[in-house]
Image (cartoon, rainbow, N blue to C red):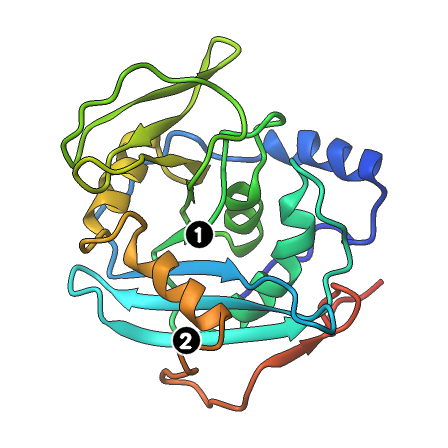
Amino acid sequence: MKVLRLHPWQLSVEEAQALQRRLARQVSRDSPLAQPPRYVAGTDLSPPDGNGRVRGAAVVLSFPELRVAEVRTAEGKPGFPYIPGLLSFREAPLVLAALERLSVTPDLLLADGHGLAHPRRFGLACHLGLLAEVPAAGCAKSILCGRHGPLAPERGAWVPLEDRGEVVGAAVRTRDATSPLYVSVGHKIDLRDAVRWVLACCAGYRVPEPTRLAHLAAAGKLLERGPGPSDGPVPIQQGRLLSEDG
């Protein structure tokens, strides 16, 4: 699948924050999917190994069967430090490189991170959705910003997540009596649809199958497969895509 090159990745903290504010204005927040997705992708990034290298992964599942259609990865050293609120500048280059290797273009992307539920309304799911030009939603395990009211214990219950008077996401019970998942709009989807499809992709676990399997692929526990050639991970140098100009 194609990925846009809208900006460089080697930025200062101040430049990265300014870029988030600018790109946040391009995010589509209220575009319900016209029809159910045929393919849903999940993305994740592994922790660094002893040499500081990480692996980004993209796993595409057919929907509603939730069968693996394609698995792609990309490896390298992140070119940006771990800074809360700037996760996408550390993770996105490697994840986008994995997405770019996909032969199957997903109709929906689920990111292991936040979308609009972010101080500058531009989390990882927004960044990936905007650059990949696909509907995207964030599926995070903890709150980055905002608060929510009481949540019923049954699977499928959800309540709005609000920050500074704005609804930025939802606390969603994806499994009975377990901690909620925090779902938010990434791009080209509205919140109700984001919650709906995240729940539809959960198959007995707290997290949806696309991101659960992407986590396994990032950890090296799910081998590459799919309609395209399995020629191994794409190397990344200093957090930049090798094909990126400038």
Q: Quadrant of residue 13?
A: top right
On residue 181, the disc is none
The CA span between labels 1 and 2 is 18 Å
Left or right? Give the position of 22 relative to 192: right
> Going 52% across and 56% down the picture, which residue do you hit?
132
Say whether residue 155 is visible: yes
Q: Is residue 112 left or right of residue 122?
A: left
Identify whether 141 is placed above or below 38: above
Tell me: 200 left or right of 112: left
Q: Amino acid at mark 2?
A: Val
Where, quadrant-wise, is the C terminus in this rendering? bottom right
Q: Residue at position x 49%, y 59% from top? A: 44
Q: Residue at the spot x=24%, y=53% of the render? A: 205
> Helix, strand or loop at disc 2?
strand
The vertical placement of 117 against 78, above or below, is above
Where is mark 2, residue-wise?
71
Q: Is residue 144 left or right of residue 21?
A: left
For this rendering, which residue is in front, 120 or 175? Answer: 175
Q: Amino acid at mark 1?
A: Val
Q: Which residue is mark 1?
A: 134
164 or 194: nearer the eye? Answer: 164
Q: Is residue 90 above or below residue 170?
A: below
- Which of the two labelled residues, at mark 1 and mark 2, occupies the earlier sequence position? 2
Where in the figure is residue 211, as x and y percent of width and height?
A: 38, 57
The answer to whether residue 103 is seen in the rendering is no
SS class, disc 1: loop
Q: Position of residue 10 (x, y in %)?
A: 82, 53
Image quarter for residue 41?
bottom left
Q: Eyeballing the image, is 239 above or below 148?
A: below
- Answer few, some or many: residues within 10 Å of disc 2's Cα (few below 14, many 20 plus, some between 14 and 19): many
